[in-house]
Amino acid sequence: MRIQPSNLFSSLHTVPGTEEFTTLLAVGGTMIERIVSCSHASPAGFWYDQADDEWVLVLEGTATLEFDPGAPVDMKAGDHLFIPRHTRHRVSGTGPRTIWLAVYLSAAT
């Protein structure tokens, strides 16, 4: 078996108004995903309500998340936060190129 590194910043697609999700690792109840957002916002009235806990880190760019209830949260490169399962949230906007690392922790034991 040959062990090879991959580069988190390779193969980035930057189409304005879109998001690209790439699963980097899925083991047991944990999934790590790279998200590339390009001037993206969740559709009006749309809220994520996920069954898994989520930890997100902005590697590059900026983003604003909204929580229901709660005030908007502005994020920049280096900022990270934990979103407990079933916390309604949405992306109200990102910069022209925002790269996230998201870690999902399954509620299943």
Image (spheres, rainbow, N blue to C red):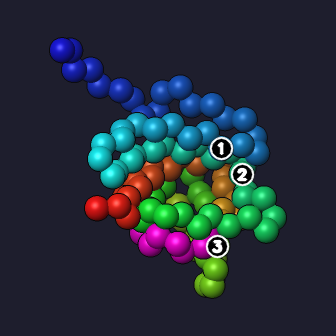
* Residue 19: assigned label: 1
Q: Which residue occupies the extreme left position in the image?
A: 1
- Mark 3 or mark 2, earlier in chain: 2
Whole-percent x, y for residue 37 in the image: 63, 46
- For the residue labelled by badge 1, is the local secondary structure a helix, a strand or a loop? strand
Q: Mark 3 highlights which residue? A: 66
- State if disc 2 and disc 1 touch (CB < 8 Å): yes
Q: Is residue 59 visible?
A: no
Residue 17 on the magenta span: no
Q: Nearer the viewer, residue 107 or 14?
A: 107
Lower sequence index among marks 1 and 2: 1
> In the image, what residue type sits under mark 3?
Glu
- Is residue 104 visible in the rendered image? The answer is yes
* Distance in Å between CA atoms under marks 1 and 3: 17 Å
Picture quadrant where residue 26 is located: top left
Q: Earlier in the sequence, mark 1 or mark 3?
A: 1
Within 10 angstroms of label 3, few (less than 14), some, or many (20 or more) residues?
some
Labelled pair 1, 3 in contact (Cβ < 8 Å)? no
Instruction: Assign a secondary structure to mark 3.
Output: strand
Q: Give the residues drawn in magenta, as a range.
A: 79-89
Question: Which residue does the image show at 28% across and 61% down from the upper left?
Answer: 109
The span from disc 1 to disc 2 (Cα, nearest Å) is: 7 Å
Task: Report if the CB atoms under discs 3 and 2 are less than 8 Å apart.
Answer: no
Mark 2 crowdedness (10 Å alpha carbons): few <14, some 14-19, many ≥20: many
Q: Quadrant of residue 89?
A: bottom right
